[in-house]
C-alpha cells in the first residue's frame, strides 16, 4: 500500500507536522522525520545510530535534520521545512512540496520555477547507514544549484549538544568519476569521501556532489511542537560544518547522492539501499501470505520492531518508537502477531529461547541485562504470556521438538506460581493467583508516580487469572502429546493440571462475575477498584480456553463494546467513572495520572475483535462486521506515524495518536485479527462453531 499526501494534506505548516514516517535498521537505530522533512521532536533524526555492540538501547542522534536550499539564477528557495522558537525564522519549504509518498521509504516531490526534485531517504537494513538521493530536472532555463547541509548532533538520543562540543571533518578521498551516475552520458561529478568526528563518534560520508567544508556554526532553537505539548524539552540545537552542492545547467537532469554511515562505507549507492529495502519488505509480505492490503502494511510495520540485542546475542522486539526499549511483557504480547502471524517462526523460536534462558524463579524478565546489571523481573503476566506464546507457536507449526524444549520451563512457571515467588505472586486456596504489594506494579497498568499508584491492582487481577487458567489447560493438553518429553521430574503437584484448572474456573466465575453489571470485576482486592469497568476483562474471553460460560462471554463482549470500545482502541476505564480522564497530555505527572484512567489503547482492540469473533462462532456475518469496523484502522495508518499504529489516544475523543507513534503490540494484536479473518472458515470448521450472532 502506497500512502500518498498532496498539498491538501499539508496546507499549513502545522498540518504538515501532524504526520511522520519511520524506518528502522534492526539494531535499534532508526530514521524518522515529519512528512515535511522537519524535526517536530528531539527524537527525530535522519540517522539515529545504534552500534551492534550496544544494540538496541544506546542510540546516538547523528544527523538530526537536513537544511536544503535551491538556487535558481539569483533567486534562493528553501526546500527544507523547520520551525524555530524565534518568530520569523521558520523555514517553509513545504510550499514547494507537490507530493509526499511513503511505501517502503519516504519520498518528496518538489517543484520550484521549473525545477523538479525528487528526494528519497533510505536506511540500510542491519547497518547505521543512510542514503539521501535527489533526482533533479532543470527546466527553469537557468543554471541551478541545490545546497544540502546536514544538521549534526552526535549526542545520545534525547540529549542536547554541549557548549564545548567540537566537530572536525577530514576529506580522505576525492576524484572525478561517474561512479554514482545512472548512465555514462551524464556529466562526471566528484566522488568525495571523508569522515566527521565529534564526542568520540565517527561518521563517514560519501557524495557525488561538491562538498564544501566550513567553520563550525550552530542552528539554535529548533522548535519541537510535539515535545512542547507534552512538557518535554521544547527546543534543540545542531551543528553545521559542511554542505554539499549539486549543480545543473539549464535543461540538464542529474541524480545527486549523499551516503552517511557510522561504519566505513563500502561501494554502496543510495539506489542499492533502495533495492534492499524494497526486496526485504516484499519478502516479508510473501512469507506472511496475508491477502488483505492493510494486513500487508501491518506485516511490514511489524518487522520494524525486531532488533538485535547485544547482551543476549539474539533478536528481540522493541516495544515502541521513539521512546521504548524491549520489555518482557510487551514482547510476549507482540510476538504472536509480529512473528507468528507473519510466518517468522525461526525468529519466534529465537526470542522464546532467550526468555527461557533468563527465566528465574518462574518469572520472565521484564527488562533484559545491560552491561553489568541484572535483569528486572517485575511482571506477573510475562511468564503466563510466555506459555500462551509457546502454545500459539505449537498450534501453527505442530513443532513437537521445540515445544518439548519449552515444556519444562512452562512447568517451572506453574510450580513457582503455585508455591509463591517474588513480588508476592502466589496461588491461594481458591486456585486464583494474587500478585503485588506495596509500591509494586506488576501488571501492564504499571504507572507509579512517586508514592502515587494511579491504578493499584494488588490482589487478583482479572486478566492474570484468565491467563493462569489457560496456562493450566495448555499444560494439560500438551502433556498428552506423544513425544512431549522433558517434563519436570519429582513435582507431584504439577501432575494434574486439569483438576486445578477446574478449581480455577469455578472460583473465577464465582468471584469475578458481576451479575448486576453483566461483566467482570477488574481485580479482587476488597477495594473500590474491584468494581471499576476496565478493558482487562476482554482477555478473559479472547483466550483459547474459556474460563467463563458462553452467555457470560457474550455479556462481557457487549459491556466492553457499549462502555469501552472506540474504533481506534479500548478505553482503559469507562467514562462514567469519577476517575476517568478524557485527555492524555501535559507534564509527566498529568500524563501518568491519565495513562490508564480512560486513555484509549490500541492493542486491546485486537483482543476485543478476537473475542467478538469467538462468541459469534467466526460466522460470515460477524467477520464482515469486523472487516467494516477495521476501516478505521486503515485511516489510522495514515495519521501519526505513516504505516504504523500508535500506543494511545485520548479517552473521550480518540482523534490524534499520542504516546509512542509506533507500538509493537498495537501492530501485533491487529495483525492477529486480520489473520483470524482470513482463516475464519478454517477456524469455524476446526472448532465446530455454529452460525450464531451476538
Image (cartoon, rainbow, N blue to C red):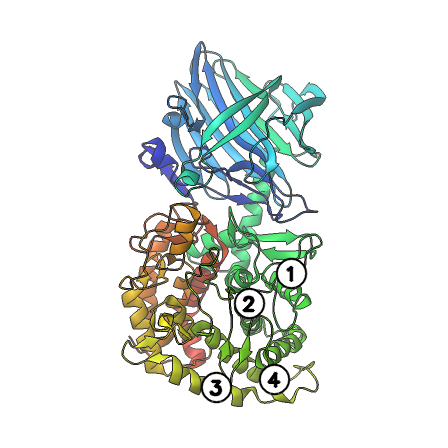
Residue 199 on image: x %, y %: 67, 32
Closer to the camera: disc 1 or disc 2?
A: 1
Q: CA distance from mark 3 to mark 1?
A: 32 Å
> First in sequence: mark 3 or mark 4?
3
Q: Secondary structure at mark 4?
A: loop
> First in sequence: mark 1 or mark 2?
1
- Describe residue 525's horizontal placement relative to residue 375 as left or right: left
- The image quadrant of residue 607 is bottom left
Q: Secondary structure at mark 3?
A: loop
> First in sequence: mark 3 or mark 1?
1
The residue to which callout 1 is attached is 375
The residue to which callout 2 is attached is 382
Q: Residues within 10 Å of mark 3 (few under 14, many from 20)?
A: some
Q: CA distance from mark 3 to mark 4?
A: 24 Å
Q: Residue at x 46, y 49 (%)?
A: 660
Residue 410 on image: x %, y %: 61, 76
Q: Secondary structure at mark 2?
A: helix
Q: CA distance from mark 2 to mark 4?
A: 22 Å
Residue 174 on image: x %, y %: 70, 20
**For residue 430, which numbered disc appears in the image?**
3
Q: Secondary structure at mark 1?
A: loop
Q: Do the residues under discs 2 and 4 have CB atoms within 8 angstroms? A: no
Residue 641 visible, this angle? yes
Q: Which quarter of the rendered picture does the C terminus lie within? A: bottom left
Amino acid at each position: 500500500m502506497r500512502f500518498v499526501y498532496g498539498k491538501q494534506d499539508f496546507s499549513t505548516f502545522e498540518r504538515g507536522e501532524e504526520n511522520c514516517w519511520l524506518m528502522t535498521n534492526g539494531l535499534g537505530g532508526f530514521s524518522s522525520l515529519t512528512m515535511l522533512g522537519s524535526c517536530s521532536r528531539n527524537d527525530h533524526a535522519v540517522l539515529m545510530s545504534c552500534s551492534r555492540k550496544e544494540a538496541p538501547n544506546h542510540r546516538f542522534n547523528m544527523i538530526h535534520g537536513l537544511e536544503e536550499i535551491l538556487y535558481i539564477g539569483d533567486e534562493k528557495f528553501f526546500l527544507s521545512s523547520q520551525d524555530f522558537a524565534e518568530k520569523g525564522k521558520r523555514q517553509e519549504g513545504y510550499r514547494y512540496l507537490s507530493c509526499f509518498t511513503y511505501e517502503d521509504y519516504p519520498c518528496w516531490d518538489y517543484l520550484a520555477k521549473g525545477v523538479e526534485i525528487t528526494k528519497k531517504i533510505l536506511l540500510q537494513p542491519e547497518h547505521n547507514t543512510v542514503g539521501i538521493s535527489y533526482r533533479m530536472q532543470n527546466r527553469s532555463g537557468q543554471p541551478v544549484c541545490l545546497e544540502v547541509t546536514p544538521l549534526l548532533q552526535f549526542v545520545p538520543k534525547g540529549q542536547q549538544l554541549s557548549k564545548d562540543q567540537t566537530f572536525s571533518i577530514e576529506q580522505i578521498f576525492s576524484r572525478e568519476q561517474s561512479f554514482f551516475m545512472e548512465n555514462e552520458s551524464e556529466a562526471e561529478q566528484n566522488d568525495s569521501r571523508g569522515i566527521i568526528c565529534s564526542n568520540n563518534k565517527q561518521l563517514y560520508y560519501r557524495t557525488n556532489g561538491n562538498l564544501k567544508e566550513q567553520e563550525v556554526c550552530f542552528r539554535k532553537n529548533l522548535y519541537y511542537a510535539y515535545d512542547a505539548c507534552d512538557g518535554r524539552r521544547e527546543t534543540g540545537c545542531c551543528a553545521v560544518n559542511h554542505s554539499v552542492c549539486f549543480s545543473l545547467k539549464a535543461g540538464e537532469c542529474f541524480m545527486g547522492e549523499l551516503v552517511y554511515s557510522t561504519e566505513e562505507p563500502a561501494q554502496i549507492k543510495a539506489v542499492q539501499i533502495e533495492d534492499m529495502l524494497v526486496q526485504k519488505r516484499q519478502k516479508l509480505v510473501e512469507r506472511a501470505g496475508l491477502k488483505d492490503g492493510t494486513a500487508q502494511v501491518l506485516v511490514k510495520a511489524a518487522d520494524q520492531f525486531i532488533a538485535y540485542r547485544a547482551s543476549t546475542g539474539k533478536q528481540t522486539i522493541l516495544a515502541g518508537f521513539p521512546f521504548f526499549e524491549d520489555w518482557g511483557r510487551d514482547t510476549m504480547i507482540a510476538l504472536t502477531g509480529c512473528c507468528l502471524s507473519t510466518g517468522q517462526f525461526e525468529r519466534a523460536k529465537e526470542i522464546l529461547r532467550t526468555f527461557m534462558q533468563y527465566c528465574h524463579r518462574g518469572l520472565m524478565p521484564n527488562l533484559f541485562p545491560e552491561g553489568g546489571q541484572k535483569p528486572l523481573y517485575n511482571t506477573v503476566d510475562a511468564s503466563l504470556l510466555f506459555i500462551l506464546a509457546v502454545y500459539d507457536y505449537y498450534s501453527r507449526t505442530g513443532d513437537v521438538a521445540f515445544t518439548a524444549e519449552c515444556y519444562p520451563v512452562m512447568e517451572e512457571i506453574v510450580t513457582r506460581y503455585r508455591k509463591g515467588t517474588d513480588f508476592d505472586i502466589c496461588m491461594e486456596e481458591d486456585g486464583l493467583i494474587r500478585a503485588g504489594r506495596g509500591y509494586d506494579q506488576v501488571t501492564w497498568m504499571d504507572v507509579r508516580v512517586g508514592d502515587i499508584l494511579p491504578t493499584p491492582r494488588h490482589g487478583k487481577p482479572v486478566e492474570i487469572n484468565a491467563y493462569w487458567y489457560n496456562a493450566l489447560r495448555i499444560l494439560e493438553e500438551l502433556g498428552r502429546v506423544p513425544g512431549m518429553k522433558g517434563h519436570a521430574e519429582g513435582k507431584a503437584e504439577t501432575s494434574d493440571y486439569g483438576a486445578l484448572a477446574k478449581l480455577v474456573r469455578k472460583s473465577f466465575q464465582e468471584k469475578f462475575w458481576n451479575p448486576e453489571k453483566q461483566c467482570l470485576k477488574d481485580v479482587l482486592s476488597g477495594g473500590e477498584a474491584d468494581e471499576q469497568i476496565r478493558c482487562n476483562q476482554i482477555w478473559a474471553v479472547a483466550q483459547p480456553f474459556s474460563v467463563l460460560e458462553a452467555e457470560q462471554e457474550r455479556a462481557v463482549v457487549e459491556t466492553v463494546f457499549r462502555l469501552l470500545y472506540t474504533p481506534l482502541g479500548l478505553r482503559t476505564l469507562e467514562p462514567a467513572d469519577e476517575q476517568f480522564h478524557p485527555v492524555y497530555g501535559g507534564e509527566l505527572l498529568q500524563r501518568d495520572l491519565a495513562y490508564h484512567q480512560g486513555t484509549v489503547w490500541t492493542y486491546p482492540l485486537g483482543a476485543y475483535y478476537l473475542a467478538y469473533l469467538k462468541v459469534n462462532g467466526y460466522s460470515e456475518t460477524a467477520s464482515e462486521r469486523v472487516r467494516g469496523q477495521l476501516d478505521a484502522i486503515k485511516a489510522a495508518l495514515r495519521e501519526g506515524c505513516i504505516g504504523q499504529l500508535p500506543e494511545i489516544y485520548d479517552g473521550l475523543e480518540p482523534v490524534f495518536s499520542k504516546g509512542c507513534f509506533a507500538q509493537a503490540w498495537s501492530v501485533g494484536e491487529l495483525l492477529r485479527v486480520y489473520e483470524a479473518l482470513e482463516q475464519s472458515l478454517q477456524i469455524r470448521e476446526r472448532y465446530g462453531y455454529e452460525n450464531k450472532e451476538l
